[in-house]
Image (spheres, rainbow, N blue to C red):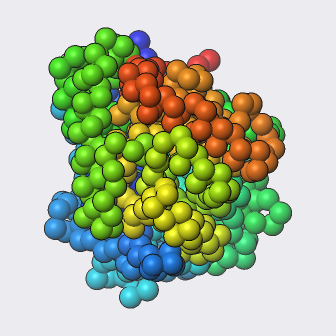
Amino acid sequence: MDIEASVPVPLVAYFSMEICLEPEIPTYSGGLGILAGDTVRAAADLGVPMVAVSLVHRKGYFHQHLDEDGNQSEAPSPWSPEDVLEPVSPHVSVSIDGRTVRAQAWRYPVQGIGGHAVPVYLLDTALAENSEHDKTLTDYLYGGDDHYRLRQEAVLGLGGVCLLRELGITEDVCYHMNEGHSALLALALVEGQMASKGPEAATDEIVEAARQQSIFTTHTPVPAGHDQFPISLVREVLGERRAALLEAAGCCLDGRLNMTHTALRFSRYVNGVSMRHDEVSSGMFPGYPVNAITNGVHAVTWTSPAFQALYDKHVPEWRRDNYYLRYAVGIPLDEIQQAHTGAKKELLAVVKERAGVALDKDTLTIGFARRATGYKRADLLFSDLDRLRSIARRMGPLQAIYAGKAHPRDQEGKNMIRRVFQAAAELGDTAPVVYLEDYDAALARLLCSGVDLWLNTPLPPHEASGTSGMKAALNGIPSLSVLDGWWIEGHVEGVTGWSIGDSVGTSSDSAVEAASLYDKLEQVILPLFCQHPKAYAQIMRNAIAMNGSFFNTQRMMSQYVRNAYPAARG
Ligand SMILES: *Cc1c(COP(=O)(O)O)cnc(C)c1O
């Protein structure tokens, strides 16, 4: 499915603070980085002209260790780009804290299905000519304090544009800011406009010219996801002149540099990542029109080997064009069941190996894995342990597999992990619950393909999209989810999965939602799973045909190509 010649696409320069290139390269923390990697993979598949820029993160995010009570401790997760990647020759300079910081870039080529490659450049300040301190600026993803973070964002935004210029990438570029971390790239564009338009040009005219070069995707309604820096810190790091420029351009809010506002101010097109998130973001950013392009996942990356083989047999075009997954309606149900049994067996073997727990292959297995942070409510399933025990005893056995890292400073997220451990201890063998350490993309692949039901319990309206349920759908796993984010679009009750609660709301009552969760398990899902396996397999097949065929990054990328990347007309 090559991009139609009728849609002229400029070269897209995709900027992201994190990106998952391979599970073992620790340059990502969660959904945002996974999405960035999947976006680049889809662009390569579709032949979209794109380059991507991120940081090298030599010490990674972190390895998670959990003790027997669920207390999390963290260890660095270092990697050496020199062992696997080639450096590119131009080095760049960024003025930070009044000093010149030099950076080089490592090139990772992402190869698409038809051979088109998208190069990803990972900026790295660990160069001999830098001070010991500046050498560490590209070490830790989301580590350090505000000062460290702002300097990293300067390397990403300013250093990134500078690198592309050094590589000869200047004309007709659309800069795509994946979240606000890279918004300082706008400064480089403004300075470029000033240089070409001359000293007489009015500020408005220069800002507008820079604005026409960029688009912005916002990813979260959660305040912690929107970086802000005191203006005094901005002066110190970027210098008086650049700080004044950002202030004059309207990038500050309440005396702080706001990266989301900077990105909004400097983008000709802004989008949220689901229909619902578009509505929520429009309310958050009055004065800025926000559009919707719902996220997806890279289908081949997230489909288990067993289902890959099944699709290759029945819908061989699916790798090149994911829309063909719509034809999964024709796959015999027993083959779907067989493929799933294979994926489940593989997951249970890993659970045995990593946690020493032998789960039962015939028991309804619930999966829950994502960043451990408050609004995701990993513990909602355990709101009423007596009720859960009673459901497990009367309606059929059930078991659950959990995973997820809490950001090292997220105490609420860490408490949530402890509560899951506590519930697991109290439930014992009545409903076995296993929490696997060190959630990463490799484990996500196993979990999102090996369980029987994918549980999603965010506090609405905080889930901008959510993507792990999409990975599950590609593997024939239905979701049981709160109506928030992508599920509002993907949910057809009893057809593609089930909702928790029955309406889309802005307020939420955890007790009511927990009761709905238990009702669905007790009255609908367990009876179906235990007594009508063919009917359950029918829902699995619908999840593939209806949701797998749409909630993928090939569809998402073609929407960016049609709606976001082309320069404004007329
Ligand atoms: C897909 C994925 C996520 C995102 O999951 P959500 O459901 O969007 O919260 C986070 N971490 C990893 C490792 C993933 O693979």
Horizontally, residue 402 falls left or right of residue 81, namely right
* Front in this rendered view, residue 69 or 147: 69
Horizontally, residue 442 falls left or right of residue 412, namely left
Decide: is 502 above or below 104: above
Horizontally, residue 61 falls left or right of residue 201, namely left
Q: Residue furthest front?
A: 394
Q: Is residue 284 visible?
A: no
Asked which quadrant contains residue 485, the reply is top right
* Front in this rendered view, residue 543 or 399: 399
Residue occupying image coordinates x 61% and y 33%: 523
x and y percentages locating residue 161 in the rendered image: 44, 53
x and y percentages locating residue 337 in the rendered image: 30, 28
Q: Is residue 20 visible?
A: yes
Residue occupying image coordinates x 69% and y 39%: 516
Residue occupying image coordinates x 76% and y 50%: 511
Asked which quadrant contains residue 539, the reply is top left
Decide: is 462 above or below 416: above
x and y percentages locating residue 38 in the rendered image: 38, 41
